[in-house]
Amino acid sequence: MPEDSIDQARRLLEEGRPEEAIALLEPVVADDDEDAEALVILGMAYVQAELCSKAIEVLELADELVEDHCVVKMFLGRALLTEGQFAYAEEMLRESIRLDESEPAAWADLGRIHYRQQEYRKALELLNEASHRFPDDVSVAALHALSLYRLGDYTAATEEWARVHRLQPELMAAISNYAYLLLIQDRSFEATPFVGAANTLDSEDYRSRILLGELRFKSGDLDGAAEAFLSVLEKDPENIEALAKMALIMHLATDEAMSREYLSRAEMQLGENPESWRGLCGIYPLLGMTSEYLDCLLLWAESDAGAATPWVLLAGEYLRMGDHEKAQEAWDTVFELRGYVKVRCPLCSEEERLPYDRSEGFDVFKDTTCSHCGRTLSMPRGLALN
């Protein structure tokens, strides 16, 4: 009986066995392509099995048969997202949330659409609300952390990855991202146990080796750092972060020929992945290549249009060069991308995020007052760089 097959397929899905569920339901749907329940379960199975074009086909049929079905729209939205049909996917997911606001997966998928389109501010605004609604959902928290990271708000992103780690302590993504953020904020003491945890969890994972290399580099162990980064390159000769760090290590070892070779190999790997820019740009000033640093930051900003980090770095570089007009323009871009002005009091160390209104602007050279300790906050020193 079709009902028995549907019930069994549903159980198989709950057990994470979509292929078996598909084998049960495809004959049912072939016999009756208006069996809405079979179509829904089959579509969910296709999504779980990553057969998204098939999922779209059957879920669109189901969507015509069952009006305003939040689960159909959610899974259809997820399949469309996977296929890169962002506008249609967003429409379905917004409809799913309108019908039922209590499903965190729909919020996470909608945030993922904005993230994939480099609309990090939109993703952040949505995920801020989702995080309040679903404080224990790992997918929402992880995507929230990634959006904050793209917007260059490292302290907030660090707090979010710490929350993800508390929710799922063995998740490598949480351990590695948390450790990495601590390291790039020069918080090596805090990062050390998490670098160790990553290498205990999987010492062969490239993320574990990168973290170990970073920690050794920051501690002054250049030989140990080189060993870690070279082990990454043995498995992935095109890893841009390892190549860039080896260029710097060779420079510090006064082997300029090898430094240039590693740098050239790193530059050849620049592509659409936004992280490739981060891996390379920060090396240039350490090599004394100021012009190349500026060029890299501008190309990074162009490549990852919704990211604030390259503009934060550009603002700092323009300020160092004494070009206040360009520094103000770069900070204006940061504020617009984030939707807020992040300030940090150097006296009491408290952070504040002030809503940004483009029509009013924000003068980065005008001193303000810390709302926590009441002292004068010297600007632009009080602007948080991360």
Image (tube, rainbow, N blue to C red):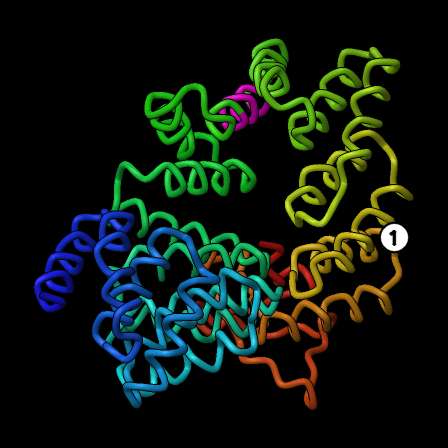
Q: Give the vertical position of 169 relative to 189 (above or below).
A: below
Quadrant in the picture for residue 140 = bottom left
Along the horizontal axis of the image, is 3 left or right of 269?
Answer: left
Q: Does 275 sit left or right of 81 as displayed? A: right
Name the residue at the right extreme: 291
The magenta segment is: 210-218
When asked about the image quadrant of residue 327, the answer is bottom right
- Asked if the magenta segment contains residue 212, the reply would be yes
The foreground one among 200 and 53 is: 53
- Name the main secondary structure of what is drawn in magenta: helix
| Residue 117: in magenta span | no
Occupied quadrant, residue 314 = bottom right
Query: For the view shown, which residue lies furthest in the front direction?
Result: 31
Q: Nearer the viewer, residue 40 or 304?
A: 40
Residue at the (35%, 69%) spot, across then down = 75
Bin the neighbour count of mark 1 within 10 Å (Cα to Cα): few under 14, some 14-19, many 20 and up. Answer: few
Quadrant the C terminus occupies: bottom right
Mark 1 lies on residue: 321
Q: Quadrant of the N terminus?
A: bottom left
* Residue 163 image offset from top left, x and y in percent: 31, 52
Q: Residue at x 10, y 63 (%)?
A: 7
Residue at the image position 61 percent from the left and 66 percent from the top: 117
Residue 26: where, in percent of width, then height? 29, 60
**Which residue type carries mark 1?**
Met
- Disc 1, SS: helix
